[in-house]
Image (cartoon, grey):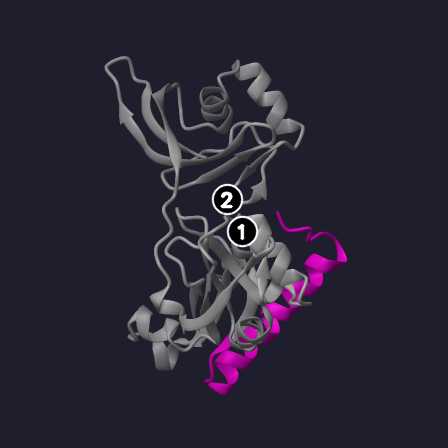
Amino acid sequence: MSTLSGKDEVLFYQRLSELCERAVGRYCPEFTHFLDGRELSLAREFLKKQSGARIVCFGGFGGAERCVVGIFPEDIYSESPEDELCSMFDISGVVISGSGFSKFSHRDVLGSVLALGVKRETMGDIYVDQSENKAYICMSNVAASYVCDSLEFVSRDKVKCRLIEALSLPVPERKFSLISGTVASERLDCIISLVTKTSREKAKTMITSGLVSVNHVPEVRSDALLSVDDLLSVRGYGRFKIITLGDLTRKGRNRIVVHKMI
């Protein structure tokens, strides 16, 4: 989760406002650095209230959690296909291939790249495939070129790197377990009770104690209403995504299907 708070959050909104004003006023697209989940939620809520701008979030991978936000003047780009706009982002993909004799993890890749002096804000998601000796990273063009020239080892394994277009990055295989059941309503406390297998009272306590986030933003209201595609994070229990919600049973309860991320 982002550590934005207080003065940092004010500066964050100020920067978004400046980018939006430049994009609309100068008829030229503007882009943020890579934002994490909470920053993306804040940016979307803020920018959708600004007039004259079309907002596109792109992080290379399908369903990327870390993305760059592109702000496009609506007068020029309102009808442009999204793929065309995504091709204008200053980001690339990096393919890291190991020797095949050892394995590495997401943490290994992240640590090795950060050790080169690369800033996290220049990096999007990292995906290590099932072989565990090949990884893909979405990065700013400058950082991607630097990593390809400089990265030699990941967790003691000799690696080779090459650049690819961000639009060519693979769709990561998301692993999850299935949770299904019924809840009294779409309220947050009802759904947290189901996914954590605890009482509704305990669910309320977790929420009011600040242990729950909805779409990467802390939520302390037990009666907040949820909907399909909402992302939940419960400290100590993991992350969840609502897949279906709202189909009523004969007794008036809501059927729900949730994916728990593994």
Q: Nearer the viewer, residue 9 or 108?
A: 108
From this view, report whether residue 204 is shown above or below residue 262.
Answer: above
In the displayed structure image, the side of residue 179 where residue 68 appears, left or right: right
The residue to which callout 1 is attached is: 37
Question: What is the residue that sits farthest to the right in this orientation?
Answer: 7
From this view, report whether residue 69 is shown above or below residue 189.
Answer: below
Q: Residue, x 50% and y 22% (percent of image)?
A: 196
Q: Residue, x 39% and y 35% (percent of image)?
A: 176
Q: Residues within 10 Å of mark 2 (few under 14, many from 20)?
A: some
**Residue 167, x across and y down, in percent:** 35, 68
- The nearer-to-camera label among 2 and 1 is 1
**Residue 254, x across and y down, in percent:** 33, 23
Residue 85 in view in this figure: yes
Q: Is residue 6 magenta?
A: yes
Which region shows up in magenta?
1-30
Q: Residues within 10 Å of mark 1 (few under 14, many from 20)?
A: some
The tally of labels here is 2
Mark 2 / mark 1, whichever is N-terminal: 1
Q: Which of the 4 image quadrants contains residue 206?
A: top right
The residue tagged with tag 2: helix, strand or loop? loop
Amino acid tagged 1: Gly
Circles 2, 1 touching at the beta carbon (< 8 Å): yes
Q: Residue, x 64% and y 70% (percent of image)?
A: 15
The residue to which callout 2 is attached is: 215
**Residue 97, x across and y down, in percent:** 45, 61
